[in-house]
Image (cartoon, rainbow, N blue to C red):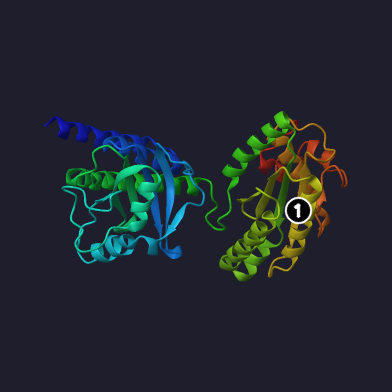
Amino acid sequence: MGGDDARLRAVVALAQTMAAAYTPHESWHAAAMGACEALGGSFAALSVWERDQGRLRVLVNAGERAEGEEEFPEDEAYPVHQFPEITEFLHERWAGGGEPDAWVETAAGAPAAGAPARGARPYCHQRVAALRRRGRGCCVVAPIVLHGRAWGELYVARPAGVPVFDRDDADFATVLAAVVAAGIAQTERLEEVRKLAFTDPLTGLANRRAVDLRLDEAVDRYRTEGAVVSLVVCDLNGLKTVNDTHGHAVGDRLLERFGSVLSLCGAMLPGALAARLGGDEFCLLAVGPPADDVVRVSEELCARAVALEPGDGVACGVASTGDDIGPVQSARRLFRLADAAQYQAKAARSRRPVVAGRDGDVIRLADSPPRSPHDRRRLRGNPPGGDR
């Protein structure tokens, strides 16, 4: 009875820990460590079955890791043909009406006493060899089923010289895998909500909320580390005419196509964030690349935008702390400079980007109050005489 109570507490603890996880990495680690502790193991791993690439990819290694095992490996993956139970047990047998039960492997390469029966199928030689190579005596492997299909596996091992897993352990591992599946499903839902909160639904780019957060962080880095922060603000020309003449579906398609061009150009700047601010307004935020690189990418963006039909190119403004633009004490200041440069490019119908600190009177324009309550710069949240 005491053992049952302990296992019940372990199940509850695993569910609670996974529910408290905020990121996928936290969720994966909680799953592996919770299962490891619940089963009295020394090591655990969580892996996902990537069908499109025909491989089992390790997401996390937790507990007593052997040499070469990273906690969150970037490229630890195994072709499924090395693990016949992945396709045969996790897919064919289960799809045919069987149950996704866990099973036990031992370093001896033979069934443990009381281990779940596996029919006539041989043990996986790769797993046995891995157990021996890493000084482990046995492991229990539990399939994880998510959304009605095999998702991956939970793997828990014990060191050599201690009692091996038995049938009761395997049955318990099956229960733990179901709890892990529920936790992973919750994490995926939370990730989707977070993604929606920071993603523009039409273009798939980041949205204004994401830009505001990233820009605040970037300006902090500029102030503390001297990192170059550059902001490119774009206004897609002629969108209203396209909507009025061809319909909003065509206008949306133009926005999507420009979003793809912006994303392509943004990829030329390592780590740049491509975003749609709303309506016909877009931006690129880069931290690190020199101002000249950002200007060159902006020129490429303008050239590519001209080729988009039925649009009329893009008005583009650039502001970078790598140029002579004066002190930048806030994200608002940099945004206002890039916006003023874009405003000037729009007014001049320029086919090239206007760059704050290099072209015209952008800085004076950014610092001047709006000419009227309807001045478009007020729409950016830039009050007259505001914070610099």
Q: Amino acid at mark 1?
A: Cys
Residue 294 percent coordinates (x, y): 76, 50
Query: In the image, is 284 to the left or to the right of 167?
Result: right
Residue 347 percent coordinates (x, y): 81, 53
Q: Is residue 213 above or below residue 185?
A: above
Q: Which residue was labeled with disc 1? A: 316
Query: In the image, is 164 to the left or to the right of 314?
Result: left
Q: How many labels sit on residues?
A: 1
Query: In the image, is 255 to the left or to the right of 339?
Result: left
Residue appearing at x 28%, y 38% in the figure: 161
Q: Quadrant of residue 37?
A: top left
> Helix, strand, or loop for circle 1?
strand
Q: Quadrant of residue 190?
A: top left
Residue appearing at x 83%, y 55% in the figure: 348
Residue appearing at x 22%, y 67% in the figure: 96
Q: Is residue 386 above or below residue 304?
A: above
Residue appearing at x 43%, y 50% in the figure: 58
Residue 28 percent coordinates (x, y): 40, 43
Residue 328 percent coordinates (x, y): 76, 33
| Along the viewing direction, whichever of 274 and 17 lies nearer the viewer | 17
On-image quarter of the C terminus: top right
| Along the viewing direction, whichever of 114 and 370 lies nearer the viewer | 114
